[in-house]
Structures are given as C-alpha cells and as structure tokens.
Amino acid sequence: MKKVIPAILLCLFLFACKKDKNSPADASVSIVGTWTVNSSNISFYDKNDKFLGSEDTGDDKVTFTNKGVVTGTITDDDISGTNTYTVSSSGGKNYLKITTDDGHQNINSVTYEIITLTAHNLELKSENIYDPDMPDTYNGVYYTKVILNVKASR
C-alpha cells in the first residue's frame, strides 16, 4: 500500500489536465504548461465493488513539457523518477497516459480520460483495476479498484 498510494497520488498530480465539457475540442489548447491541482479524489473499492472510502488532496503543481516529460511538486510524498506522458484519442474520447519509471525497474502507468481541457481548466478521471491475487489495503481492508478524479487550473 505504501508504494501504491504515492504512485497513485503522483499520477493524479501529473494528470491534472483536461478538455472543457462545454467547449468543442480545440487543437490549439494544449496540456503543456504548469497546472495547479485544485482538487483530487481517490476512491477505493473492494472486490465486490463496495466503496471503502476516499482521500482528497490538492494545491499541488504539475508541469507538462512539450517534450513529453511531466514533473510535479507533491506536498505529501517524496516521489522521484522519470515521468513521461502521452495524449491520445480513441472512440471520440481523449486520454492522458502518465508513466513513471523509478530507475529500479519499477514502472507504473495510469491512463486518464480527459474530461475537460481548456486554456485554464483540466479535469481527469481514471478507473484502475488491480489484481485480486495481489491485493493492497485501504484502512485495513483489501481493495481491487481505485477511481481517481482530478481538477486543475492554470
């Protein structure tokens, strides 16, 4: 759990960009730049899809470069490594994938659906399913699903 939560939080902070629901996709709007995470929520579920609880964080900054690198300031965790991102489209939806490599063959990727991405607002959502044979715990209860919601601005 100690390794999963920081990785999830890092990914949350790094995926803090999005497409505006009220605006059509605009090719001139880019995720590149520095975003302030206004709110992020991590919800945990057990193997029966029962809600176990959630955690809220915010006020962190994430920077996406035009070279596919992402950096972040995480106030609660000291996480290091190389973080890269890609933006893609599929089925009429846009996605942000952030990959973290800690340099010790520990690689973690999280894909977010970009709900909103405008010049000033970003909203992301990700649902991650974990192997029930390798469970981790939230407040002492094993979870197998995590839903991440992030809202950021610049």
Image: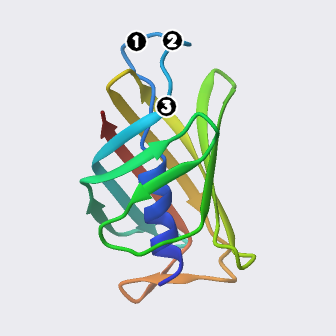
In contact (CB < 8 Å): disc 3 and disc 2? no
- In the picture shown, does residue 59 fall above or below 125? below
Residue shown at 36% from the left, 40% from the top = 35
Tell me residue 43's x, y (percent).
39, 62
Which numbered tag is attached to residue 23?
A: 1
- Residue at screen point 69% across, 24% down: 91
Mark closer to the observer (3, 2)? 3
Front residue of this view, candidates 32 and 24: 32
Q: Nearer the viewer, mark 2 or mark 1?
A: 2
User: Dot 3, how many residues are within 10 Å of its Cα: few (below 14), some (14-19), or many (20+)?
Assistant: many
Looking at numbered disc 2 in the image, what kind of residue is underneath it? Asp
Compared with 154, 47 (above or below) is below
- How busy is the neighbourhood of tag 2: few (under 14 within 10 Å), some, or many (20 plus)? few
What amino acid is found at the position of numbered circle 3 in the picture?
Ile
Disc 2, disc 1: CB below 8 Å? yes
Q: Position of residue 90 (x, y in %)?
A: 70, 28
Q: Which residue is mark 3?
A: 31
Q: Which one is closest to the eye, mark 1 or mark 3?
A: 3
Q: Quadrant of residue 113?
A: top right
